[in-house]
Image (spheres, grey):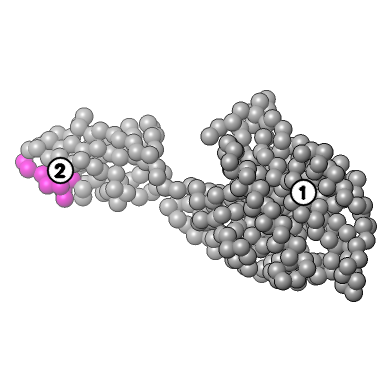
């Protein structure tokens, strides 16, 4: 009996891929089909090697062909398996630089700096994203006046993909988009780290020059999850000039510089550097001390990326959802624009060195790295 290719393909449409829940013909897994009399041979092509699936699918192919074409069909032993490299781009493949924004302690204005830096970078024409990784206290939705937004989630190739919302030229994702603002998140560590991975690895980020990660204050599981999930280009540490904040900033710097993490620290940002009243724009009152971050940067051989004053308009911008950096012609907007340019320069300088690798923390915290 002579068989046709259509008969073979029609028979194989009954064979379903166990993971993708779609028949192997629709998945275009049948290659190199040859028919010589009763002899039928072809290759099953897999995007990644899975020996269990290969063996089972071969058996199901034989059963489907013999059921539909008869036992005379000579197919047993004639099905080969091929594996090809999965060329589907990963969620971070088109993100050029991932920058962690951290602080040793809370209340130093880290989210304000992260939000304004993101906008200031976008003002340069760069493609920018911002992840609000402060899972327990997300503030980015309020700072961008997006509290009522709910990002679209679509099922693509069997996986949920989250589409960031856009404001002021910045792509945004925050856990605050998925919960009511009044609700308190009472999560154990694994739940929080899982949420961060969803924002990072399920976000449809597309092509970005900079993806900023607004981390929670201190050092925690969230920080470890970040450096294990993605290769962080560099970290920026935010502090106020006062001694108690600087002491905690040192811990944050040492965490990134530690042998187990080894993420370059791009520099320090001194927030609340001085107070300038609107009616006396030339006056500077050093409420939290003078030059603390500058001295620390020099001591730890770091760049002082910027000094941001306490100005009423910055606070108002955070509360009303219009970051000060949106208006680069103002004094505060200019300060963030200047800081953004310094950050760009430091990232370019950092990228002349070896790229950061993702970190593998073993059970014994040996800190081995994996590409």
Q: Which residue is drawn at 12% across and 47% down?
A: 4
Q: Name the residue under label 1.
A: 304
In the drawing, does residue 71 fall left or right of residue 321?
Answer: left
Quadrant of residue 276 within the rendered picture: bottom right
Q: Residue at x 68, y 31 (%)?
A: 260
Q: Is residue 360 above or below residue 208?
A: above
Mark 1 Cα within 10 Å, few/some/many (few <14, many 20+)? many
Locate residue 67, reporting x and y percent: 20, 42
In the drawing, does residue 135 fall left or right of residue 128?
Answer: right
Q: Mark 2 points at which residue?
A: 69
Circle 1 — which element? Answer: strand
| Residue 191 visible, this angle | no
Quadrant of residue 120 within the rendered picture: bottom right
- Specify whether residue 184 is painted magenta: no
Locate residue 76, reporting x and y percent: 20, 31
Foreground residue, 4 or 273?
A: 273
Q: Earlier in the sequence, mark 1 or mark 2?
A: 2
Magenta range = 1-8
Q: Residue at x 35, y 50 (%)?
A: 22
Locate residue 254, reporting x and y percent: 76, 36
Q: Quadrant of the N terminus?
A: top left
Q: In this view, which residue lies farthest toward the bottom?
A: 279
């Amino acid at each position: 009996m002579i068989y046709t290719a259509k008969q073979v393909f029609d028979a194989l449409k009954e064979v379903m891929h166990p993971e993708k829940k779609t028949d192997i013909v629709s998945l275009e897994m049948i290659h190199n089909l040859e028919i010589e009399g009763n002899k039928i041979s072809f290759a099953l092509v897999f995007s990644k090697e899975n020996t269990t699936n290969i063996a089972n699918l071969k058996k199901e192919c034989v059963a489907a062909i013999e059921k539909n074409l008869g036992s005379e069909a000579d197919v047993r032993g004639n099905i080969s398996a091929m594996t090809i490299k999965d060329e589907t781009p990963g969620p971070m493949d088109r993100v050029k630089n991932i920058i962690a924004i951290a602080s040793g302690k809370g209340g130093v204005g880290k989210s304000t700096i992260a939000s304004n830096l993101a906008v200031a970078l976008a003002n340069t024409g760069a493609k920018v994203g911002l992840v609000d990784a402060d899972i327990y206290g997300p503030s980015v939705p309020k700072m961008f006046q997006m509290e009522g937004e709910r990002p679209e989630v679509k099922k693509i190739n069997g996986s949920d993909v989250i589409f960031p919302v856009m404001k002021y030229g910045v792509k945004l994702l925050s856990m605050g988009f998925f919960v009511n603002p009044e609700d308190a998140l009472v999560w154990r560590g694994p739940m929080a780290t899982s949420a961060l991975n969803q924002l990072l690895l399920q976000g449809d980020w597309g092509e970005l020059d900079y993806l900023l990660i607004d981390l929670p204050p201190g050092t925690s599981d969230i920080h470890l999850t970040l450096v294990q999930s993605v290769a962080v280009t560099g970290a920026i540490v935010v502090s106020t000039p006062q001694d108690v904040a600087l002491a905690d900033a040192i811990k944050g710097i040492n965490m990134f510089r530690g042998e187990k993490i080894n993420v370059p620290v791009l520099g320090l940002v001194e927030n609340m550097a001085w107070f300038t009243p609107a009616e006396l724009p030339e006056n500077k009152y050093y409420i939290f001390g003078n030059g603390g971050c500058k001295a620390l940067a020099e001591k730890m051989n770091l760049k002082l990326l910027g000094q941001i004053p306490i100005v009423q308009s910055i606070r108002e911008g955070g509360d009303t959802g219009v970051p000060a950096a949106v208006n680069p012609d103002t004094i505060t907007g200019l300060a963030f624009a200047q800081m953004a340019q310094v950050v760009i320069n430091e990232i370019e300088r950092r990228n002349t060195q070896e790229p950061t690798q993702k970190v593998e923390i073993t059970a014994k915290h040996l800190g081995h790295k994996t590409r």
